[in-house]
Image (cartoon, grey):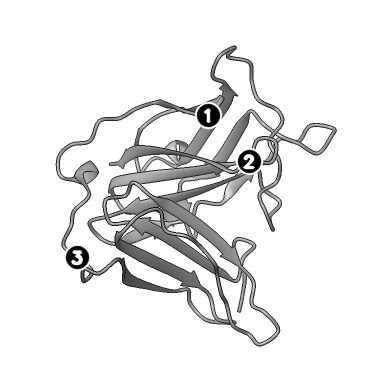
Amino acid sequence: FDSDNGSKMNIVITSNNMDYFKYFRLDSNDKGTFSITTQFPSNGTYRILTAFKPYDANEQRFTFFTQVGSQPPNVSIMSTSFRTTPEFIASKTVGEYRVRLEKSIYNASNIQDQELKFNISNAVTGKPVTTLNFLDNTRTYGDVILFDYIRNYFVIPLPITNPQITNGQGGPLLRFKLRENDKPILKGYYKVFFEFKPENEMLTADFIIQIL
């Protein structure tokens, strides 16, 4: 397998209502297989999206549905986030931290408007957070997944810069390319999941953006 973003296999798990999200970056074991261990938060339908790139070939993506509990998977459930024009929220509080997304509406045809910027601060004092650690098995302080629920399409934007403090930690600003394979992302509404790791705790903030 090739590795475009530092991982040979990317697995994204979401609940069908988009309230739950989990992202796994994997390398194969000595038998050439991939495996994960996880715990689902509740009964219900979940979708599992996989992305990988065989050596010297195009990226492959597959989606699976699984059911936790006794009911069969309900693949017709539509996330309420995409039934109508969504509400754009610029900042979210996660634990002791506030994450601010610079903007929520982007123009796919404008090369200057294809960058996601996240700013992390202390939720109480407003002080910029510069104690972000590298995510597990990566050299980045954050991960971003964009998910278009209607088209079952997701994007893993690559980081642009990782501001690093002298002690190896980073923050408060993290930037990501709003492009896929150096091409504009399809127009539409996207649920954005942003993962970051202050101290030794993995946290997730979610937003909704529109690409025109």
Element type where label 3 sits in the image: loop
Label whose residue precedes the other's in the sequence (1 or 2): 1
Residue lying at 48% horizontally and 73% vertically, measured from the top left: 59
Q: Label 1, on which residue? A: 95
Q: Label 2, on which residue? A: 201
Residue kind at label 3, given as amino acid type:
Asn
Q: Is residue 211 above or below residue 39?
A: above
Of 187 and 130, nearer the camera is 130
Residue 37: x percent and y percent?
A: 54, 67
Of 111 and 54, nearer the camera is 54
Label whose residue precedes the other's in the sequence (3 or 1): 3
Tell me if label 1 and label 2 are in contact, CB under 8 Å.
Answer: yes
Of 44 and 197, nearer the camera is 44
Tell me if label 3 and label 1 are in contact, CB under 8 Å.
Answer: no
Residue 122: x percent and y percent?
A: 59, 20
Q: Residues within 10 Å of mark 2 (few under 14, many from 20)?
A: few
Q: Quadrant of the C terminus?
A: top left
Q: Could you tell me if residue 180 is visible in this image?
A: yes
Residue 159: x percent and y percent?
A: 59, 47
Label whose residue precedes the other's in the sequence (2 or 3): 3
Element type where label 2 sits in the image: loop
Extreme residue in the front direction: 70
Residue kind at label 1, given as amino acid type:
Gly
Q: Label 3, on which residue? A: 74
Extreme residue in the bottom direction: 31
Apparent side of residue 187 relative to residue 157 in the rendered image (left or right) = left
